[in-house]
Image (cartoon, rainbow, N blue to C red):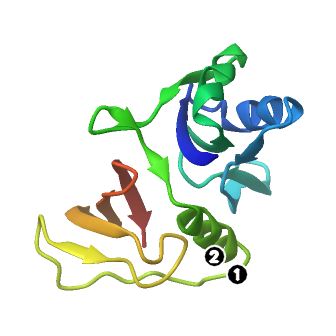
Amino acid sequence: MNWYALYTKPRNEKKVEEQLHKMGLEVFCPKVSVVKQWSDRKKKVSQPLIPSYVFIKIKEQERDLVFSVSGVVRYLFFLGKPAIIKESEINAMKETLNHDFKEVGVMDLEKGQKFTIEEGTFKGQEATFLEQKGNKIILRLESLGIKLILEK
């Protein structure tokens, strides 16, 4: 059995995770708590760390089962094959999400520069610095093939 990354319809991560879990499959959707503010109140809500992605541990021959779930779009592919996520990467995300962290700092990076993330949820991941826009830093995570936007 391997871990795979599933791409979901926008804002369907929690529903997909719940439905796959009901099917008896091992599913992981990393979530973080954030404070949302409306005009009349503030509320702490849980939202997916990586929008539109859910991780699933499933046998290669059973991969098509997930398409019976509403909200699943496709698997993430790398070099023409479904991307296999290492168990250690999933465990690292789970472990890091159990700890609070205050701030992530990035300094003196040039566009296109590759580096290894040393702290936080994506510790140990290879990333490429793409750009900084105001208080946002945009990175590309090599192993997942996604853009990550960090806000200072």
**Residue 52: x %, y % from top left:** 54, 37
Q: Nearer the viewer, residue 70 or 151?
A: 70
Q: Which residue is mark 2?
A: 96
**Residue 66: x %, y % from top left:** 67, 24
Report crowding for label 2: few under 14, some 14 to 19, many 20 or more residues within 10 A (C-alpha): some
Report crowding for label 1: few under 14, some 14 to 19, many 20 or more residues within 10 A (C-alpha): few
Q: In the image, is residue 61 above or below residue 5?
A: above
Callouts 2 and 1 close, C-beta under 8 Å: yes
Residue depicted at 22% across the width and 66% down the height: 129
For the residue labelled by badge 1, is the local secondary structure a helix, a strand or a loop? loop
Q: Is residue 88 left or right of residue 28?
A: left
Residue depicted at 26% across the width and 39% down the height: 79
The tag on residue 124 is none
Residue 102 falls in image quadrant: bottom right
**Residue 12: x %, y % from top left:** 66, 30
Residue 81 falls in image quadrant: top left
Residue 95 falls in image quadrant: bottom right
Quadrant (top left/top right/bottom left/bottom right) for the C terminus: bottom left
Q: Nearer the viewer, residue 64 or 111?
A: 64
Q: Nearer the viewer, residue 125 or 111?
A: 125
Disc 2 marks which amino acid? Thr
Q: Is residue 137 left or right of residue 103?
A: left
Q: Which residue is mark 1?
A: 99
Residue depicted at 45% across the width and 81% down the height: 104
